Image: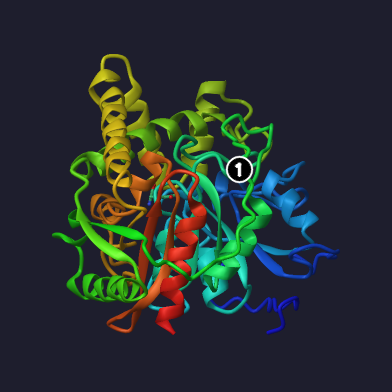
Amino acid sequence: MGENEICFEPADRYNAFLTTCKRAPHGQGKLAGVAIAVKDNISTKGIETTCASKILKGYIPPYDAHVVELLKKSGAAIVGKTNMDEFGMGTTTENSAFGPTLNPCDTGRVPGGSSGGSAAAISGGMVRMALGTDTGGSIRCPAAFCGIAGLKPTYGRVSRYGLIAYANSLEQIGPMGHTVADVSDLMQVIAGYDRRDSTSYNKPYTHTPCADIRGIKIGIPQEYFSAGVDPGVAAVVSKAIGRLEELGATAVPCSIPSMEYALAAYYVICTCEASSNLARFDGVRYGPAADTKKSWHEAYQEVRRAGFGTEVRRRIMLGTFALSSGYYGKYYAKAQVARENVKKDFARIFSEVDVIAGPTMPTVAFKLGEKSDPLSMYLTDILTVPVNLAGIPAISVPCGKAGGMPVGLQIMGRPWEDERVIDVAYASEQGCV
Ligand code: GLN
């Protein structure tokens, strides 16, 4: 495939796309003519944007997200909107209202989630790059499961303007691609200040990956190799870290004790934020039609019952409960304390090492339908959510296979050191071929 060639094949064997677009005219710029897929929770002017939810069926945004404006300016061709877990709530893309996406590496397995459509579109050879979003691992998990690269940028580095919010204090839009160089190229286009996002920082990204990692110190948290992590996955990741040492890096053991509470804190905070963010969907302008003869309250209930899937309703209820009078201090306030402790643990470790490395996910991709109870699904996010609680950058890069399926190496960095995370991943990738 030529660098600037549109390679989009509408034949979508993996249900990676919810909407495909006619070939967009492309101009000049860094990504001139490059086919890019965009996750369906990112607003695209004139192109249906559903968040894989029935409640947004038929919604055509009147404006582009900041990142989409930047993509268009760079000359990229947006070829479609990708499947996802409804509103980003899930780890497998099975929570889509429009059917699951299949993993191109093994179509009997999930692609990971929630940006599973974006990962499958890349892994299946339909596009070179895609945008995903990561609230608790949704870029890194599908990148790991599908054998591609994906970066969760430092919180504030990429504008969230036009991203339909799930849990806004945790999430970032980020680049996904076949290689770390693709991820870096896309990051150059999407990062930077935007006055329409009050959490946006003026930190453009102009870096080109460099594989020289001599002298870099890598923290290896014991919690990332303990119970619950598949020994096959741990072995592949340890070997990848060994290769980084051969390239001149030093591995140093460390510990993140706050991980004991990180997952619980994440699920309290994300459900609280979701219950508030999703209150706006009332079915009045799009989605399932409301019965106009009913009272507003009844119609609102009916539309939301019909429009939201089981997992979304579960999370709205959990979040509403946690925020209700008398419970706020017991759940939300405690979760914020745990979040601070996670931040402090990372700050302490980063005063001694440059990056932290471990597996992205505790296992390889699950079989379709394998995880049926929500709790066991939530538990699989344990290695990705600490990053979102702390707002730091992290990448998943393929580092080998276990049982024939791809394994992701996760590299986490100090805030605003997305460049360093990219470099270590780039070095690992070079050693992997
Ligand atoms: N699996 C996590 C969740 O369900 C993360 C999702 C995401 O990052 N959007 O919340």
x and y percentages locating residue 60 in the rendered image: 72, 46
The image quadrant that residue 130 belongs to is bottom right
**Residue ranking furthest to the top:** 326
Depicted 159 relative to depicted 126: above or below: above
Identify the image quadrant of the C terminus.
bottom left
- Left or right: where does residue 109 sit relative to residue 16? left
Residue 47 in view? yes
Query: What residue is drawn where x is 33% and y is 66%?
Result: 249
x and y percentages locating residue 126 in the rendered image: 62, 76
Please give the residue where the numbered disc 1 appears in the rendered image: 203
Query: What residue is drawn where x is 44% and y is 72%?
Result: 427
Count all numbered tags in the image, as a single digit: 1
Asked if ligand 1 lies within 8 A of label 1, the reply is no
Query: What residue is drawn where x is 68% and y is 76%?
Result: 10
Q: Amino acid at mark 1?
A: Lys
Out of 431 and 92, give the one closest to the viewer: 431
Out of 348 and 31, give the one closest to the viewer: 348
